[in-house]
Image (cartoon, grey):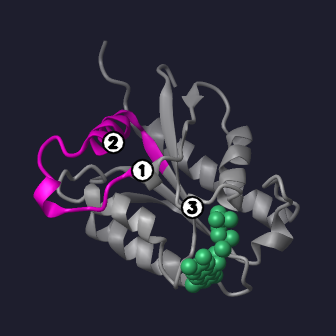
Amino acid sequence: MGNRKKVITILGSIRESSINTNILENLASFFTGNIDYPIYDKIGEFPHFNPDLDNEKGPKGIEEFGQELNEADALIFCTPEYARSIPGVLKNTIDWLVSSGQLLNKTVAIIMTSPMVAGGEKAQVSFLQTLEMLNANVVKDGTLVISSVGTKLNSKGEAIDEDTRLFLELVVESIITEIKKKKAPLA
Ligand SMILES: Cc1cc2nc3c(=O)[nH]c(=O)nc-3n(C[C@H](O)[C@H](O)[C@H](O)COP(=O)(O)O)c2cc1C
């Protein structure tokens, strides 16, 4: 890759000791070379979505977030399941992105986590429906559910389960493969 790439990761949990934060911090080790990998952890600061405020600029935080998204080559969401869907704070964020079409064709991967044996899948289905409606480009092998998360990762978010480590690596590889396909803009 000739130019630098940027993969923004977006946390679906705003809890201080979030396991999803740990996962994203550890995921950085799978990225090599000229890829910037900022973790976006401010979605809790966004106002409630209101169509009356959803104009060209939008509220301040949303406007800045939109600019960051425009600069990103890909996004990785990492989120818990709440009440069998994505947390409201993440849905709120997505609602702010609907009218601008900012997820249109955006290269996306999603990682869902759950402490439960069968958790995370319902949220994945729900989130995929939303992303499909917005025509995001969810990459092949870029969807992962980590159920029983407490048995698969240690307290630092490092995978202690080999399959989980390989699947996390695959998510990153699938994102890198996709962004490599995109041509660098002409200088
Ligand atoms: C309001 C609420 C609803 C939840 N609903 C579900 C659920 O439907 N399925 C599930 O697997 N876990 C559910 N959980 C458990 C979360 O997945 C768990 O708290 C998770 O570790 C939070 O991730 P975090 O450590 O990144 O904050 C719920 C937790 C809360 C607080």
Q: Position of residue 151 (x, y in %)?
A: 85, 72
Task: Report if the CB atoms under discs 1 and 2 are less than 8 Å apart.
Answer: yes
**130 or 184: which is nearer to us?**
130
Task: Give SS at disc 3.
Answer: loop
Question: Pointer 1: residues within 10 angstroms few (<14), some, or many (20+)?
Answer: few
> In the drawing, what numbered circle is on residue 13?
3
* Residue designated by label 1: 45
Tag 1 secondary structure:
helix
Residue at point 56% right, 75% down? Answer: 81
169 left or right of 143 in image? right
Q: CA distance from mark 3 to mark 2?
A: 18 Å
Nearer mark to the viewer, of 3 and 1: 1
For label 2, the SS is helix
* C-alpha span from label 3 to label 1: 12 Å
Amino acid, disc 1: Glu
- Provide residue 98's location: percent of width, then percent of height: 23, 59
Q: Nearer the N terminus, badge 3 or badge 2?
A: 3
Q: Is mark 3 within 8 Å of ligand 1?
A: yes
Q: Is residue 113 on the magenta stretch?
A: no
Q: How many marks?
A: 3
> How would you rate the neighbour count of disc 2 (Cα within 10 Å): few for under 14, some for 14-19, many for 20 or more?
few
Q: Is residue 115 above or below residue 159?
A: below
For residue 61, the mark is 2
Location of the C terminus by quadrant is top left
The answer to which quarter of the image holds residue 164 is bottom right
Q: Is mark 1 within 8 Å of ligand 1?
A: no
